[in-house]
Image (cartoon, rainbow, N blue to C red):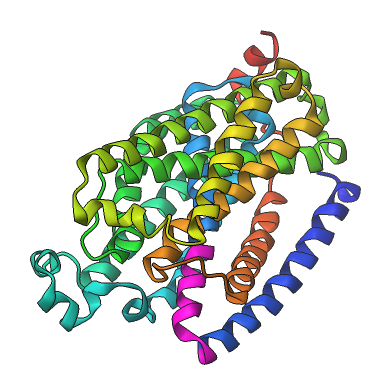
C-alpha cells in the first residue's frame, strides 16, 4: 500500500480502537456490577472473534497448500487475522477468573450430585482447563507465526523455498486445526452443560469459523478493493469463486447442524436432548428460526444464482448477513447453557462484542499494513493468472 491508501485503514483503525476501549470500560463496570452476565457475554464475544482468526488460519493453509487465483485477493486478510492470535490469548485471560460462573464442573455440589461430572473430574478441573488452553493457543500461535514468517520471506525473494515450506506445514496444519479446536471447544463450550456431548459439534464449530472468516474477508475486499492494488487481481470471476465457496460452506454448516439435531432428537436420550430443549424454550425459538433463515435459507437461495455471485453488492450483502447470523449462532450456543427457560439479552452482550471486536480489529488492521496488499513472488500466482 502507498501512503494515500493508508487513509481509510488508519481512520478505521482509530475508530475501532476508540470504540473498543469505551466498550471494554463498560465491560469492566459490568464485571463489577453483574459478574455472572459479564463472563457469559465476554465468552460469547471472545469466541466470535477467535472464530474469525482460526477460520482465517485454516483458509490460509488451504490456499498455501492448493494455490488458486481466488486466494490471492484475500490472503493478506487471512494472514493479518491469524496474526492476532497472541492478542486473543491475552483477551482469553479474563475467562479464567469466571470459570465458577460458567462451568458446572467447578462446583463441588454439582459434581457430587451428577455421576457424569464425577467421572469427568480427572479431566475437567481448573488446572487441566488452563493447561489445555495454553497448549492449544501455543499450537495456533506457532502455526500462524511460521506461516506469516515464511509468507514474508516469499515476498522478499524469488527462491521457491519459502513456498515449499508453506505447503509442507499447511498439510499437517489442516489436521492439527480441527483436533485442537475439538479440545478447546469441548472445554470452553460443551462443558457448560453438565453432561452433554456430541461428536459432530467440533467439526460444526470448524465449519462455522471458516464461514465467518470467509464472510469477513469478502466484506473487507469490498471495502478495500478500489482503494488498494487489489482491483488489479479481482473481477467478476473472483467474486463468483467467493460466492461458490460461501454457498458450499453454508450448505455444509446446515448439513452438519441438521445431522446433529436429527441424530440427537431421534436418540431421545435425556442427557443429549436437553441441550436442544432449552435452546427452543420460550423466546429461544425465535433465535433458532433466525438462524435457519439467515444462516442458511436466504443465503442459500440467493447464492444459487450465478448472476448474484458475480455482483459485488449482492455478495457483500450475503456475506454481512452470514457474519451477523454466525455471531448470533455463537451467542446461541453459549447463552442458553445458563439461561435455560427463555431468551435473555443483556447490554453486556453488545458491549463485549464491540469491546473485544474493537481491540481485535485495531490489531488486525495494524498487521494488515505490514505487508504489500498483493502477495509477491508466489510462483503459482503467475500460473493462476493465466488460467
Taking the image as shown, residue 33 lies to the left or right of residue 177, namely right
Question: Where 161 falls versus 335 (above or below)?
Answer: above
Figure quadrant of the N terminus? top right
**Relative to residue 101, is residue 361 depicted above or below?**
above
Residue depicted at 54% across the width and 46% down the height: 289
Residue 282 higher or lower than 56, as above or below? below
Residue positioned 19% across, 49% down in the render: 269
Count how many numbered circles sit on residues in the image.
Answer: 0
- Residue lying at the far top of the rendered structure: 387
Depth check: give the residue in front, 133 or 214. Answer: 214
Range covered by the magenta-colored residues: 32-45
**255 relative to 87 in the view: left or right:** left
Say if residue 39 shows up in the picture: yes
| Coordinates of residue 306 in the picture (x, y in percent) | 70, 16
Left or right position of 5 against 84 = right
Q: Which residue is drawn at 69% across and 44% down?
A: 320
Q: Is the magenta stretch mostly helix, strand or loop?
A: helix
Quarter residue 265 falls in: top left
- Percent of width and height locating residue 228: 83, 39
Q: Can residue 152 be seen in this view?
A: no
Q: Does the magenta stretch include residue 250?
A: no
Amino acid at each position: 500500500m502507498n501512503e494515500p491508501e493508508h487513509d481509510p485503514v488508519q481512520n478505521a483503525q482509530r475508530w475501532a480502537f476508540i470504540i473498543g476501549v469505551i466498550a471494554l470500560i463498560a465491560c469492566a463496570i459490568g464485571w463489577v456490577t453483574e459478574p455472572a452476565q459479564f463472563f457469559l457475554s465476554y465468552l460469547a464475544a471472545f469466541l466470535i472473534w477467535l472464530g474469525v482468526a482460526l477460520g482465517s488460519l485454516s483458509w490460509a493453509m488451504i490456499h498455501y497448500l492448493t494455490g488458486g487465483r481466488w486466494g490471492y485477493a484475500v490472503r493478506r486478510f487471512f494472514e493479518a487475522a491469524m496474526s492476532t492470535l497472541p492478542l486473543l490469548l491475552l483477551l482469553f485471560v479474563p475467562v479464567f477468573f469466571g470459570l465458577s460462573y460458567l462451568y458446572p464442573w467447578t462446583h463441588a455440589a454439582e459434581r457430587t450430585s451428577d455421576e457424569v461430572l464425577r467421572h469427568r473430574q480427572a479431566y475437567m478441573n481448573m488446572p487441566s482447563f488452563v493447561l489445555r488452553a495454553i497448549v492449544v493457543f501455543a499450537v495456533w500461535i506457532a502455526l500462524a507465526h511460521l506461516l506469516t514468517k515464511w509468507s514474508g520471506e516469499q515476498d522478499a525473494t524469488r527462491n521457491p523455498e519459502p513456498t515449499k515450506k508453506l505447503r509442507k506445514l499447511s498439510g499437517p496444519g489442516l489436521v492439527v486445526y480441527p483436533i485442537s479446536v475439538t479440545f478447546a471447544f469441548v472445554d470452553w463450550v460443551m462443558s457448560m452443560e453438565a453432561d452433554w456431548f456430541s461428536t459432530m459439534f467440533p467439526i460444526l464449530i470448524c465449519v462455522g469459523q471458516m464461514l465467518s472468516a470467509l464472510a469477513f474477508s469478502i466484506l473487507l475486499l469490498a471495502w478495500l478493493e478500489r482503494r488498494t492494488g487489489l482491483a488489479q487481481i479481482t473481477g467478476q470471476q473472483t467474486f463468483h469463486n467467493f460466492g461458490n465457496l460461501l454457498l458450499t460452506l453454508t450448505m455444509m454448516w446446515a448439513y452438519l447442524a441438521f445431522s446433529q439435531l436429527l441424530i440427537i432428537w431421534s436418540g431421545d436420550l435425556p442427557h443429549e436432548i436437553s441441550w436442544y430443549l432449552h435452546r427452543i424454550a420460550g423466546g429461544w425459538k425465535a433465535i433458532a428460526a433466525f438462524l435457519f433463515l439467515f444462516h442458511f435459507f436466504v443465503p442459500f437461495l440467493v447464492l444459487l444464482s450465478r448472476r448474484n455471485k458475480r455482483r459485488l453488492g449482492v455478495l457483500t450483502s450475503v456475506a454481512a448477513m452470514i457474519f451477523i447470523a454466525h455471531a448470533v449462532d455463537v451467542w446461541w450456543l453459549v447463552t442458553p447453557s445458563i439461561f435455560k427457560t427463555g431468551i435473555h439479552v443483556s447490554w453486556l452482550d453488545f458491549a463485549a462484542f464491540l469491546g473485544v471486536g474493537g481491540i481485535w480489529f485495531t490489531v488486525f488492521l495494524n498487521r494488515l499494513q505490514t505487508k504489500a496488499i498483493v502477495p509477491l513472488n508466489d510462483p503459482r500466482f503467475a500460473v493462476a493468472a493465466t488460467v
